[in-house]
């Protein structure tokens, strides 16, 4: 069972829990037919994922296992200063049974939208909040 997060070309992302054992053994960067996860007519690319403890998959680490590697920047570590390196745990670039989330992006879209094929109702856009300060809300100046 994977939580698949599909990022569409319009910038919206949709997620759904899917039982897709055919994803096991695929690597980051592989192209996937969308029919494997219920998106007929779509071509998807695997862009990332994380295991059950939350460790991210990294494209340059081969294999299935979790490894502690020395990172200076990139997936799994954001350096505060330039030149700082730290040893962090990351997962390899191959999907296994221990992966719980798989991130995918749309390479070629199908005829129908992702939310229609999965039966998800998209959230309405948020209203823009206008930050206006009225004269009554301002604190009064102290006389002294």
Image: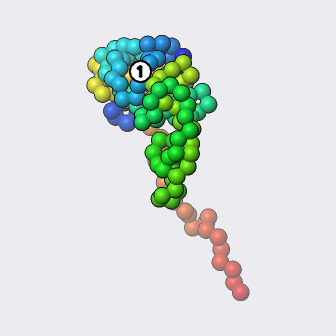
Q: Residue 139 location in percent, x, y?
A: 65, 70
Residue at left 32%, top 20%? 42
Q: Is residue 112 visible?
A: no
Crowding around mark 1 (Cα neighbors within 10 Å: few <14, some 14 to 19, many 20+) is some
Q: Quadrant of residue 87?
A: top right
Relative height, residue 56 to residue 82 (above, below): above
Relative height, residue 48 to residue 16 (above, below): below
Residue at left 65%, top 74%? 140
Q: Residue 143 location in percent, x, y?
A: 69, 84
Residue at left 30%, top 28%? 107
**Secondary structure at numbered mark 1:** loop
Q: Is residue 72 visible?
A: yes
Q: Residue 36 location in percent, x, y?
A: 40, 13
Residue at left 69%, top 80%? 142
Q: How many marks?
A: 1
Q: Residue 46 location in percent, x, y?
A: 39, 27
Foreground pick, 105 / 46: 46
- How does the figure colour the protein chain or chains? rainbow
Foreground pick, 57 / 63: 63
Foreground pick, 100 / 82: 82
Kindly give the residue lying farthest to the right in the view shown.
Answer: 144
Quarter of the image with the N terminus is top right
Relative height, residue 108 to residue 54 (above, below): above
Quarter of the image with the C terminus is bottom right
Foreground pick, 38 / 100: 100
Q: Which residue has dot 1 on it?
A: 26
Q: Is residue 10 left or right of residue 61?
A: left
Q: Quadrant of residue 115?
A: top left
């Amino acid at each position: 069972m994977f939580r698949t997060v599909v990022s569409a070309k319009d910038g919206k992302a949709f997620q759904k829990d899917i039982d897709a054992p055919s994803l096991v053994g695929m690597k980051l960067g592989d192209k996937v037919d969308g029919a494997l996860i219920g998106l007929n007519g779509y071509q998807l690319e695997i862009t990332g994922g994380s295991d059950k403890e939350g460790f991210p998959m990294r494209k340059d680490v081969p294999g299935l296992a979790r490894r502690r590697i020395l990172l200076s920047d990139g997936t799994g570590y954001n350096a505060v200063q330039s030149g700082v390196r730290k040893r962090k745990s990351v997962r390899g670039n191959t999907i296994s049974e221990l992966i719980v989330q798989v991130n995918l992006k749309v390479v070629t879209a199908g005829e129908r939208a992702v939310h229609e094929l999965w039966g998800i109702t998209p959230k309405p856009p948020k209203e823009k909040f206008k930050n206006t300060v009225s004269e009554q809300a301002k604190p009064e100046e102290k006389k002294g």
